[in-house]
Amino acid sequence: MLGLSGESKIFVCLEAVDLRKGFEGLSRITESLFPQKLLTGSYFVFLNKGRSTIKVLYWDTDGLAIWNKRLERGSFPKDLLQKQMDRRSFLMLLEGVVPRKICRRFSSF
């Protein structure tokens, strides 16, 4: 289970990745795309070519952890992916929710 706080930064690799990679391979990709961010507590999202599998690499206070989800049917939508996502969009992506329009109820200060 991913425990995402409101302040967590979520970075997405927009290119397809061979998800047979483990900690070493994914951390190398992370360092090349997002320098100096690997050990900051941010979450790094990787998808395979068919967008049916997603891996999330993150620093869990004392080591790297990987979270993996494979869809039995369908794929993760490509049009929702951005280089950096907010918590709400990321959780909707994981749950398969495809919003037509996202509106905030309250304006941010």
Image (cartoon, grey):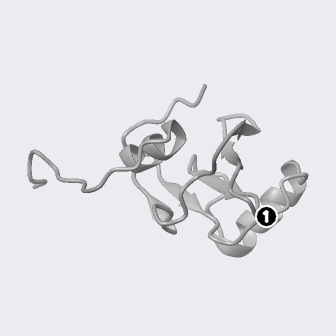
Q: Residue at x 53, y 57 (%)?
A: 77
**Residue 103 placement, left or right of 89:** left
Occupied quadrant, residue 2: top right
**Residue 109 placement, left or right of 53:** left
* Amino acid of disc 1: Val
Q: Residue at x 69, y 48 (%)?
A: 54
* Residue situated in front as seen by the camera: 33 or 45: 45
Indicate the position of residue 85 as horizontal and vertical percent values.
44, 58
Residue pointed to by mark 1: 17
Element on which disc 1 rests: loop
Indicate the position of residue 72 as horizontal and vertical percent values.
72, 36
Quadrant of the frame with the N terminus = top right
Mark 1 neighbour class, 10 Å CA radius: few under 14, some 14 to 19, many 20 or more: some
Indicate the position of residue 44 as horizontal and vertical percent values.
63, 54
Indicate the position of residue 70 as horizontal and vertical percent values.
73, 39
Occupied quadrant, residue 97: top left
**Residue 5 to residue 16: above or below:** above
**Residue 5 to residue 9: above or below:** above
